[in-house]
Image (cartoon, grey):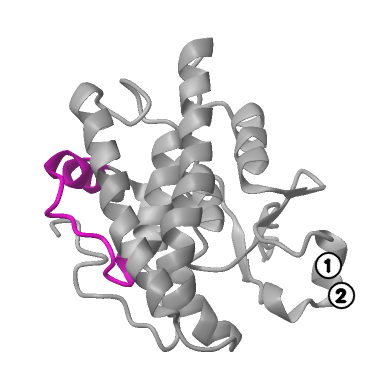
Amino acid sequence: MDIPSQKLIMIRLYHVPLSPFCRKVRLSLGEKKLEVELVEEKYWERDPDFLRRNPAGKVPILRMDGKTLTESSAICEYIEETHPTPSLMPKDPGTRHEVRRLVAWFDDTFHTEVTSKLLYERVNKKIIGTGYPDSSNVKAGAKAIRYHLDYMEHLLDQRRWLAGDAMTLADFAAAAHLSALDYISDVDWNRCANVRDWYAKIKSRPAFRGLLADQVPGFPPPSHYADLDF
């Protein structure tokens, strides 16, 4: 009797579960229905093999098509260009710019003002062993997230999705950050009805299932985290 050959996994992602940049890539791969092997990378240990893959010492790192790809937005655009269906980037140049603008907004401004002040202080410092949360940073992040949620509410009051009428990479960038913060109960979903409805839609997508199954030792998620009717 012939024994079926083991299916080779052609895509491997070196990641950290609560990294919003890794989550954005995972959502893009999931939406394209691309099977991926997840390898958790303790980037702070500066392993020589890891640094050979990315001398910048950052995750995510994607091995795909025989290439080693770094930088989350560049990775997502590579995935989009090599697997264009379903599309996460609109064809219209103006809307494409809006998608890229919002991806940069969340990965730069939101990350600096919110994610790094809440997630990194509450979780990363303990995991990496660099001390206790800075209460002034936590307070600043808790204040800043309200402004960003209000801005999202403003966008969603005019649009079906963040960048326009269709779901795009901008929605995944935002959801990647907010889902990581939701894991530690730092999002007030009652503040903005449009944002809550938007997150409920995107949270229910099959691409999100892997994120909802994440478990970080020492940091159990709240009961509502994986609940689609949160």
In the picture, the disc for residue 201 is none
From the top left corner, tell me how far across and down residue 190 is, in percent. Answer: 12, 54
Query: Residue at (46%, 23%) from the top-left corner?
Result: 98
Above or below — where is 61 with respect to 153? below
Q: Secondary structure at mark 2?
A: helix
Q: Between 158 and 205, which is closer to the camera in this rendering?
A: 158
The 10 Å Cα crowd at callout 2, few under 14, some 14 to 19, many 20 or more, is: few
Please, what is the three-letter code of the amino acid marked with disc 1?
Leu
The 10 Å Cα crowd at callout 1, few under 14, some 14 to 19, many 20 or more, is: some
Judging by the rendered image, the residue that carries numbered circle 1 is: 51
Tell whether 45 sits left or right of 86.
right
Above or below — where is 182 with respect to 40? above
Highlighted magenta segment, given as a residue range:
182-201
Q: Is residue 88 visible?
A: no
Please, what is the three-letter code of the amino acid marked with disc 2?
Pro
Question: Contact, CB < 8 Å: mark 2 with mark 1?
Answer: yes
Quadrant location of the C terminus?
bottom left
Q: Secondary structure at mark 1?
A: helix
User: Can residue 198 be found in the magenta stretch?
Assistant: yes
User: Can residue 132 be found in the magenta stretch?
Assistant: no
Query: Residue at (51%, 25%) from the top-left corner?
Result: 89
Above or below — where is 163 with respect to 186? above
Judging by the rendered image, the residue that carries numbered circle 2 is: 48
Q: Between 151 and 63, which is closer to the camera in this rendering?
A: 151
Tell whether 165 sits left or right of 72.
left
Query: Residue at (59%, 89%) from the top-left corner?
Result: 129
Tell whether 185 sits left or right of 5.
left
